[in-house]
Image (cartoon, helix red, strand yellow):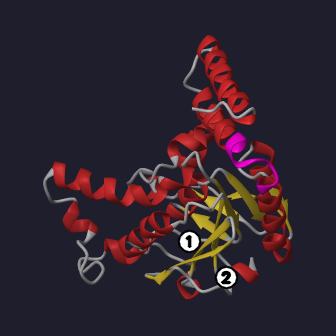
Amino acid sequence: MAATDSATPLLDQDGVRLTVDGATATVTLTNPAKRNAQSPALWRGLVEAGRLLPGSVRVAVLRGEGRSFSAGLDRQAFTPEGFDGEPSFLDMGKGPAEELDAIIASYQEAFTWWRRSDLITIAAVQGHAIGAGFQLALACDLRVVAEDVQFAMRETSLGLVPDLTGTQPLVHLVGYARALEICATGRFVHAEEAERTGLANLVVPAEQLDAAVADLAAALLAAPRDAVVETKALLQGAVGRGLDEQRAAERAAQGRRLRDLVGQGD
């Protein structure tokens, strides 16, 4: 990871840096002084990072500089002045519903591309991952967390809801009842619970986080790319399919793989 971040970045703006080392990309949140607090500019940077990923990339790692992954939305969004050149969230709430919906949809794009079937994405999470930070970690396929991790969904306590695509993966990972309790109370979820409930794939000491993520990325790259892409697509669609539909999807995917292996692909 350190070697990857020392490479010449393809993007380095608005608190987001993108570097690529072979088949692995690293997207780093680069405002540790503010615990990588998020803003519309940062979200546009994340969208641009996804757009700039070379086709050779198979694994994308998301990490935050400093002691925290991301402490969530920068509270400046809720001040009357908001951010320079951005609509204040207070003003947004006074505008037309259609306009508000379009603005939120544009913010959600920063959290969406991590689910692409041609990538496996890993969040390397240390310290605080609160609100938008929690949802950004949930946007990734896998989460490797440090022992000091503190997840929390604080939107409800602010009179809001989690709206950055985090609700569906949270329910899928921990179940409806626990997801409701986590969101409605805004309490912290620490490393032991995160691993036990499936939020975290792996928990390691903070000083081992980068090495553990690098090892996982290497393991993911060991299998042929097309087989991993087909498998991810099968698993992503499994929840919404009945058994017969899933069986048919498995047959179709395996047929494509076998034809490709013997040189009879379409």
Label 1 environment density (alpha carbons within 10 Å; few <14, some 14–19, many ≥20): many
Spot occupied by residue 218 in the image (x, y as percentages of width and height): 81, 61
Separation of residues labelled 1 and 2 (CA atoms):
22 Å
User: Which residue is disc 1 drawn over?
Assistant: 71
Spot occupied by residue 217 in the image (x, y as percentages of width and height): 77, 61
* 197 left or right of 120 in image: right
Q: Is residue 214 above or below residue 29?
A: above
Segment tinted magenta in the rendering = 221-228
User: Which residue is disc 2 drawn over?
Assistant: 5
Instruction: Tell which residue pokes out farthest to the front in this image.
Output: 263
* Amino acid found under the numbered disc labelled 2: Asp
In terms of depth relative to the viewer, which is nearer, 152 or 206? 206
Quadrant (top left/top right/bottom left/bottom right) for the N terminus: bottom right
In terms of depth relative to the viewer, which is nearer, 66 or 118? 118
Q: Residue at x 65, y 50 (%)?
A: 141
Label 2 sits on a secondary structure element that is: helix
Q: Residue at x 70, y 52 (%)?
A: 142
Q: Is residue 40 above or below residue 176?
A: below
Is residue 1 within the magenta segment? no
Spot occupied by residue 234 in the image (x, y as percentages of width and height): 64, 31
